[in-house]
Amino acid sequence: MDDTATLEPAEVETTGPVSRADRREAQTARIMDAAKKCFVRSGFQGASMNEICREADMSPGALYRYFPSKEAIIEAIAEADQAEDAEIFEKMVDNPDVIDGFVSAAIEHLVHVHESGAAPLFTEVRAEGMRNEAVRKCCEISMEHARNSIRNYLQAAIDRGEINPRAPLDILLPVMMAIGEGLVLADLPSKGVPVEQIEKLMRAAITANLRPANSPANDF
Amino acid sequence: MDDTATLEPAEVETTGPVSRADRREAQTARIMDAAKKCFVRSGFQGASMNEICREADMSPGALYRYFPSKEAIIEAIAEADQAEDAEIFEKMVDNPDVIDGFVSAAIEHLVHVHESGAAPLFTEVRAEGMRNEAVRKCCEISMEHARNSIRNYLQAAIDRGEINPRAPLDILLPVMMAIGEGLVLADLPSKGVPVEQIEKLMRAAITANLRPANSPANDF
DNA sequence: GTTGACAGAGCGAACGTTCATTCTCATATA
DNA sequence: TATATGAGAATGAACGTTCGCTCTGTCAAC
């Protein structure tokens, strides 16, 4: 009836053999995909291993060959989730316009979370991070990674005299990231708010706090 | 050893008797307080009824006289939590300066969540709302309540010609609320960011989007 | 004022179920 | 044959909830 997963040994690619390592990787990914669905549906604690096995079309015995525990699956997902996000803010440095660079990165993140339907998972990871030490660590590391990328980016712009932030970076960064995270978690596009509008308002908010010095006529 | 709760029939107040209804109310509150602690510690699904009973210093049999199920406790807490928040935005209308009114309300909310240590519970409620219909409804109702309060407040200011928002209210409100929620959930004061600084940056962001017409010299 | 029936409150063992995990055994690959 | 992979029944612990019971305070009847 379902059979949604790519499982059959042949037919998927024309290649028949598939090395041991490749199969292991594919199976691991299959479990993580299934687990994500279950976690979104039922939460980390609410999803049972049986539910995940059913979703992955796999027996418990098989699953436990790839992950030693439920906890390990949660951690792997949290890690993958956060690693994905970190990338976005690294591309930011290529944009010479610091405000456009930051806003574009944030919006790209927002669109990515929206389109992949990851907002519930994101929320779940956040909640789990409040009590699960491993998940918290993982979140903090990726957060700090992003924060450092942004900090360097903004500091360079400050040094060039392009912006004159309303507060020291130690204050500004956490606030800007909290604002961004709020916008991402709310998943407004799914509620009918167009991305372009979100971007416009966000840009105004960020501009007001970064205060570009040489900007051609701020219109407010 | 602990005996933290107000349980003893006498001694708490000079009044000895304590009516049946009063005791019921007190016990209900005691259970909800204990449950909150457990939910923060272990999550809605991770906290067991036994854990809650232990925290409330009460047997399961006794607890089930007050709540028919674990689900019912969760709903009661979510409801109380959200009802508390709604109040803050109703007092907002008393402030004639619309930007100050909005920002002050948001900051008051933020401080309240920070001081009551409610951020983890808030996060938990959000996550549970993603899958529990009753909790979702409860969140949406209180959200809409707050949104309506703010909408009326801003619309009046628009009609008076005091502000000229950068976008229609249908767009502006969800964005502003998402920003506010992000700031509340991040609980920045607990990470060393002073409230006054958050307020300053938030005020700039909001001002940039509401665009007060008669404001004496915008400094950006 | 005493008595006795009654209702609400509370207790904690016990229930059936479900959980994460393990074990045993079969199959497929090399 | 040797080894990695898989299935699925089995396991014991923990879960939410229920049950039968006791205790305590209230109040009408006398």
Image: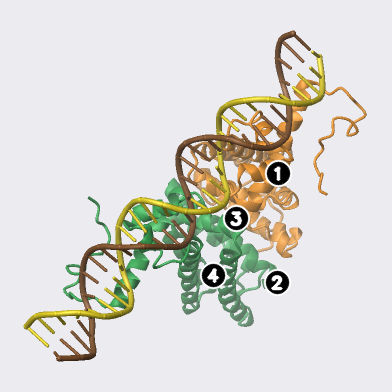
Chain colours: A orange, B green, C yellow, D brown
Give the foreground label among 4 and 2: 2
Query: Which residue has dot 4 on it?
Result: B99
Sooner in the amino-acid sequence: mark 4 or mark 2: 4
Residues marked 2 and 3, same chain:
no
Which of B68 and A69 lies nearest the eye of the viewer? B68
Q: Which amino acid does label 2 sit on?
A: Pro
Label 2 resides on the chain identified as B
The residue drawn where x is 52% and y is 54% is B124
Q: How far apart are marks 2 and 3 (CA)?
A: 20 Å
Q: In this view, does B1 lie above or below D27?
A: above
Residues marked 1 and 3, same chain:
yes
Which of B88 and D22 lies nearest the eye of the viewer? D22
Give the foreground label among 3 and 4: 3
Query: Which residue has dot 1 on it?
Result: A54
* Cβ atoms at labels 4 and 2 below 8 Å apart: no
Q: What residue type is labelled 1?
A: Arg
* Cβ atoms at labels 1 and 4 below 8 Å apart: no
Q: What is the x, y in percent for residue A13?
A: 90, 31
Numbered tag placed on residue A182 in the rendering = 3
Which of A89 and A142 lies nearest the eye of the viewer? A142
